[in-house]
Amino acid sequence: MADNLLTIMTFFPVLGMIALLFIPRDNDAMLKSFALAVSLITFLISLPLAFDRVFTTSGGMHYREFYEWIHVGEFFQMNYNVGVDGISLWLVMLTTFIMPIAILSTWNAVKKNTKGFMAMLLLLQTGMLGAFISLDLFLFYIFWELMLIPMYFLIGIWGGANRIYAAVKFFIYTAVGSLLMLVGIIFVYYYAVQSGAPVNGFGVHEFYQLDLPYNAQFWLFLAFGFSFAIKVPMFPLHTWLPDAHTEAPTAGSVILAAVLLKMGTYGYVRFAMPLFPEALPTFIPYLAFLSVVGIIYGSLVAMMQEDVKKLVAYSSVAHLGFVMLGIFAMNMQGMAGGMIQMINHGVSTGALFLIVGFLYERRHTRMISEFGGLAGKMPIFATIFLIVTFSSIGLPGTNGFVGEFLALMGAFESDLRWFAVFATTGVILAAVYMLWVYQRIMFGKVTNPANEDIKDLSLREIVVMLPLLVFVFWIGIYPNTFFDKMNPALEQLIEQMNNRQVAVVEVVEPVVANVVDYK
Amino acid sequence: MENLVQEAIQNVNLHAVMPSLILTVAGMALLMVAVFSPRGKTTHIAWLSIASLVVAGVVTLAGWNDTQTGFAGSVQLDNFAAFFSMICIIAAGLAILMSDDYLKREEFPVGEYYPLILFTTAGAMWMVSGTDLITIFLGLEVLSVSLYILAGFFRDQQRCNEAGLKYFFLGAFSTGFLLYGMALLYGVTGTTKIYDIAAYVQANPDTTTNIMFVAAGLLMLTGFFFKIAAVPFHMWTPDVYQGAPTPITAFMSAGPKAAAIAALLRVTIICLAGIQDQLTTVFWVLAVLTMTVGNLIALCQKDLKRMLAYSAIAHAGYALVGLVAWNEIGLSGILFYMLVYTFMNMGAFAVLVLIGRRGEEQLTLEGFSGLGYKKPVLGVALCIFLFSLMGLPPTAGFTGKFYIFAGAINEGFIWLAVIGVLNSAVSLYYYLRIMVFMYFKEPQEDFSWVTINAATAVSIVISVAGVLYLGIVPAAVMQFAKMAGL
């Protein structure tokens, strides 16, 4: 079992999906329970990873699995090459953790074609897990693209009024970026092969050692970075996100926010930055600038939204800005802050989307002006909403504080000091828009008669929220559980990137010229 | 004189033409069967045709790695020819599977239909195995003449007549180019045998600067470009593809096109290697034009057959990318891609065959509204084909494109690969639009006329299996494509 843990974990959802197809389509309860069971079992399968002490001592890859997959002589070779380290560990856990919550949250929301909905969610999970564990660029690309298909249908079939536009926009935005990355991936491979460097298929660890000339690194970083920046999304490539988030069904929004956006940031940490370390310093100021713009712009736009779901969507742009800023600081605090902020954003924004979903299920509107004075009618909801609001703002004691504080501190101590100064205003702006929306929805008198008989959270809804709240405080009060396992991997990564940047003093001419010439 | 005859007889070697011989004999026999069959009964002819295709396929596969040369070196059944022959056989088989019910629906069940497909396939096989310009020309003509008839097969339908006539005129026109080029090439080198031409050019390097030689090459290429519908020689494609019977459209876009690409490859790589640098530029420009024009025009198509016709043009452009690369990976990539394309495109057309009604007027985007809900299995199958046509993993379309673009990038044509993938991005939009109508719109009709008959279902299942197999575990077939490289 332990030998193939990652494979079993990754493909269990898709096996579940295939089994799901044989359940009669009108048996909604059974379809939902079955999908929930599959996602819970996947979570249980992944659980040993979280308790494995090996991550605290060694920053390398664990649970490695390696099989030959497509070998076509000297043409190209791809392998099934997977593993987790402290960086991907928590993202994998986040994925398996959020999935049952997402499925449970749809219990009453999805009425049409439940079978297709559940099948798409499970397929999506395989795509996400596979992308996080892939150590072969080709394999990564397969899973990366595989995520598009279910998400496209989730938004397009079960989304809101403007769903077709949002779905197509989401699909094309993300696909364009990744297609350019594909060219980059193939280029790196043939550069490695033709320069005689050791390769192991498209294995990323061999590519880390590759001596790419600066010129090639520049373009490659652009290709990879563009693709990941769309996914994050970074300003000004973020425009698909508000549309997709607003139109997606609640479960889709939760997964989109909690996991899919992390693909972009994870892509930077795992691929774009360590693969092309020499090009990195060239880009960091621009990327950091865009992150800060994203933070401030996202917050300001969020403030002005009348649709609470759009507000949360724009707040995502801002939160991901902190993640990116922390990562680009390239020091321990910044990286760790960025990484933990990824998890935080998954927990907090996931929770926020669930809360929006609860409101929408009750009132079938998301306009802030439609609400007001709900605190008196829904005390449990009010408490939970408040905690999540604090976590999203980053109040000390909640998870958001740890992540944003570390990310900003890391940025402040690095060359990005002035960026950090401006980014800090984002924390204040977050307080403004979150508290303001909380105030408008929850406080005051009930002005809209439709809110008079609004019901408080049901037991199922509380069960959905509870695990998220646990992590809000766990990460907020004792983040070391997570840092202990993350740090060795991050240290190794930072050391590796610094070594590469120092080691190469001058631009090395390419060994094989014809790969870099543009014909 | 006697010596010549004797030598010719000794040189015959029927093994080199065995697969096409089987199909030709079977085709002629089936013509007779059709004559003696009662009117309107064609099913048995379809099955006999399938059987002969299976036999031809087995014979072709048995000859793998066993190059046979025959007819004094004018035919060579090597791995390259065998691979392309298999593509044509598969295409013909899938086309026949989806035809029987279709012919009955269009109320034109005429037995000659199937032998004509077999003749087309035999002609395609001569094209792919021809090592003499004349053999290639003969193959092309057999193929074309049969296809002219098939394209206009429903003689009482106007759109069909238009398709047949257009195809005939432009086809004849393009053959003129091809033949003129061959004549010039003969004039320069004094032989029509491809390998002798190559040897002559090798021995006389100044041939490559001979204006006649260059003109010969370009004229022949023009002829082939017509057949593979490369822009700007594509004008006939949309009308013919839209007007022809749907199974024939499917067949044309896969089998005969693959054969034309095979002949183009063999002639180019062997005869015209001397002017590779200049030709690469030609192919570069044509590849970009073909991909871009095909995809851009497909964007605004409302009729699905027409949309797939433009998408077929774009896919020919992707194949040309491999020719630009002009290396082992790129060329094997073309072989693999044509096989992949056969499965995904014919699968998509098979679904169209099922959805269509007599006259096929509702094969529009609106006509597909809500199909995914009314016919879920067909919907899923069509989605798989469309994702494959987009080039998305884990389908064969992705591995096929990967193979070709890998060849281009390996050779340093990075910008061409970038243009190629951006073209894929453009194509996403119109393929996605079909799915938008299938799943995101409410059903307008209940699709009650759609009856899923066994034969067409089999062709869809084979196509789905092919697309997924070549997408997930493509190594074995990729290896075959590698061995089949020129």
Image: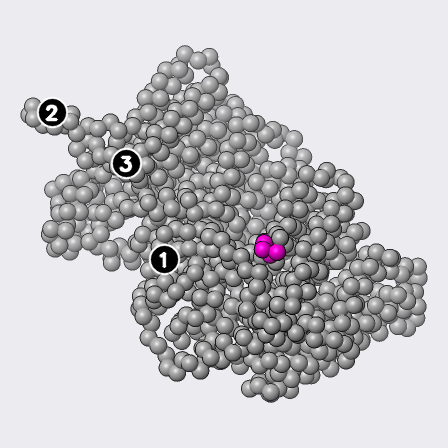
Within 10 angstroms of label 3, few (less than 14), some, or many (20 or more) residues?
few
The stretch of residues the image draws in magenta is A2-7
Disc 1 element: helix
Instruction: Name the front one of labels 2 and 1.
Output: 2
Q: Earlier in the sequence, mark 2 or mark 1?
A: 2
Mark number for residue B6?
A: 2
Chain containing the residue with disc 3: B
Labels 3 and 2 within one chain: yes
Q: Chain of mark 2?
A: B
**Chain of the residue that carries numbered disc 1 in the rendered image:** B
Label 1 is placed on what type of residue? Ala
Please give the name of the residue rendered at 44% of the width and 66% of the height, measured from the top-left corner.
Answer: A206
Q: Amino acid at mark 2?
A: Gln
Is residue A417 visible in this depiction of the protein? Answer: yes
Looking at the picture, tell me which residue is in the foreground, B184 or B264: B264
**Nearer the N terminus, badge 3 or badge 2?**
2
Q: CA distance from mark 2 to mark 1?
A: 47 Å
The residue wearing badge 1 is B408
Image location (x, y in percent) of residue B473 = 48, 46
Q: Which residue is mark 3?
A: B66
